[in-house]
Amino acid sequence: MVKLTMIARVTDGLPLAEGLDAGRDQKDADFYKQQAKLIFKNLSKGHHEASRMSIETGAYFFHYIIEGRVCYLTMCDRSYPKKLAFQYLEDLKNEFERVNGNQIETAARPYAFIKFDTFIQKTKKLYLDTRTQRNLAKLNDELYEVHQIMTRNVQEVLGVGEKLDQVSEMSSRLTSDTRIYADKAKDLNRQALIRKYAPVAIVIGVVFILFWLKNKIW
């Protein structure tokens, strides 16, 4: 099953588009997104041995293809067929080049093509069930071979120890910042409610006290 999809410009590692499985744990998602960004950073420095590669990382595999100075990367379960993963990336590549090809080099901000997520999500659904007639036909397509695509471990690609510690640190920082933002949002909402209803409560209190004093006097 496809878990994460990212598209980036190889020359500088700039993320161009992304498709994320919203059902996954946020901390888990942040960790693997940071790994993907470090892979893009390495590619931007010319650290790539092939235009197609699989990278083992924990319970998953990253798969990527590079074409037209753009990297199309996805992360799948280890059990997901490699052949389908690369054909999924080919479909994304063909559509992305067709729709955005003449704007890739001039993109200046991250996720400039975020609307492409609609196509990513639609295409991902087509590859969800490996047993459909469509996907079985792709698996049996002898003209599309993936046996010679190189496989590496993420530690080999990013470097042992230091880079993985950096990923964990960045992921923890993202999760911590998210919690802080959520807490601040709650405080702001609470303060807004107080400002909105405090005058009403004061008026009601004054009316109640006046009414009580009136009854006591009379």
Image (cartoon, rainbow, N blue to C red):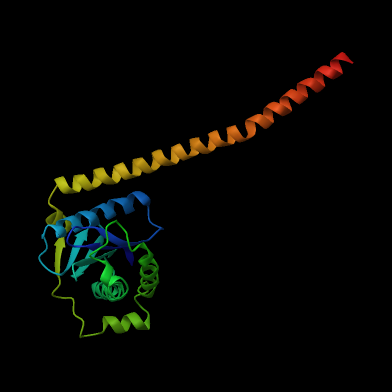
Residue 75 location (% of width, % of height): 27, 63
Q: Is residue 130 visible?
A: yes
Query: 120 and 116: which one is in front?
Result: 116
Quadrant hosting residue 63: bottom left
Task: Identify which residue is drawn at 21% across, 82% down.
Answer: 144
Residue 140 is left or right of residue 160, and the answer is: right
Who's the residue at 77% across and 25% down the image?
207
Foreground: 190 or 33? 190
Image quarter of the N terminus: bottom left
Is 211 on the left-hand or right-hand side of 201?
right
Q: Is residue 161 above or below residue 125?
A: above
Toward the top, the furthest residue is: 217
- On screen, residue 202 above or below 164: above
Quadrant hosting residue 83 = bottom left
- Left or right relative to 180: residue 157: left
Picture residue at 34% right of the left edge, 44% below the top: 175
Image coords of residue 103 (percent x, y): 27, 67
Q: Position of residue 135 (x, y in %)?
A: 33, 80
Quadrant containing the C terminus is top right
Q: As displayed, is residue 6 above or below residue 84?
A: above
Q: Position of residue 69 (x, y in %)?
A: 18, 67
Residue 77 seen in render: no
